[in-house]
Amino acid sequence: MSLACDTCPVRDSAACAVLSEEERTALATAGRTRVLERGEMLFAAGDEDAACATLISGALKVTAYDADGNERILSLVHPSGFIGELFAPFAHHDVVALTESRLCTFAKADIESAIESYPALARALLRRSQEDLLASRSLLELTAQASAETRLAALLHDFAAAASDTSCHIAARFELPLTRGEIANMLGLTIETVSRKLGEIERAGAISRSGKRGIEVVDPALLRSLSGRG
């Protein structure tokens, strides 16, 4: 499926936003739209020349497996996020859809060529890579030191921030892209602890749950305080 940049919901926040209309049009000719179902893999560790992509909608997880075969979620990718290991001969991690996800995909060679042609794109991707690295370090620090409640509140806050269409405030409502088991995996907690702490955060008045995965942020300031993000 060919790309439709004019109607892309992340056209102003993705790395390609730094390009002129002419440059964006030229880049779009090399890309295509791909839709992944929940659980479908974008690429696997060891794949050669794995495609690069910008996430348009949905959510992805980047995972690895330990020596015992247990999955570890290393990071999450939210809309406008860039996925791909540039200049590496093969992928080092699995990238899997957490929900139905729509992506703008490119062959690695096409992105590498675009970086050479458009220096602004190279700088934008470098900034995004640095942001992703800082987010990963923040998650490591969180899981190593913070209490269970703080870990969960921080994750909820980050989900709300990712679901917002502006950097000025977090979204009032969002759908949890992870199951409780996946949240427990990511935060180094048990499923029972995740369930208990989710209930405590709700009773404190920070959030309200609706349905299986719906979350309403009732008190953004309180959620931020509980998360330690303040």
Image: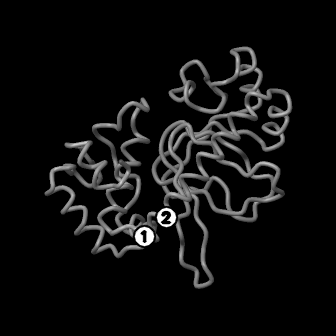
Mark 2 touching mark 1, by CB under 8 A?
A: yes
> What amino acid is found at the position of numbered circle 2 in the picture?
Glu
User: Which percent across, then down, holds residue 20?
Assistant: 70, 16
Dot 2 crowding, Cα within 10 Å, few <14, some 14–19, many 20+: few
Can you identify the residue that label 2 sits on? 141
Element under label 2? helix
Residue 186 horizontal/vertical position (percent): 46, 66
Q: Is residue 199 left or right of residue 84?
A: left
Residue shown at 40% from the left, 58% from the top: 178
| Residue 145: assigned label | 1
User: Left or right: 12 with respect to 161?
Assistant: right
* Residue 105 in the image, given as x and y percentages of width and height: 68, 39
Quarter-wise, where is residue 65 in the image?
bottom right
Where 13 sits versus 101, above or below? above
Residue positioned 58% across, 80% down in the render: 69
Figure coloring: one colour
Name the one closer to the observer, 226 or 112.
226
Q: Amino acid at mark 1?
A: Gln
Q: Is residue 92 left or right of residue 54?
A: right
Q: Tell me if mark 1 has few (under 14), some (14-19) or many (20+) residues whose alpha carbon lies within 10 angstroms of its own.
A: few
Q: In the displayed image of the protein, which residue is found farthest to the front?
A: 230
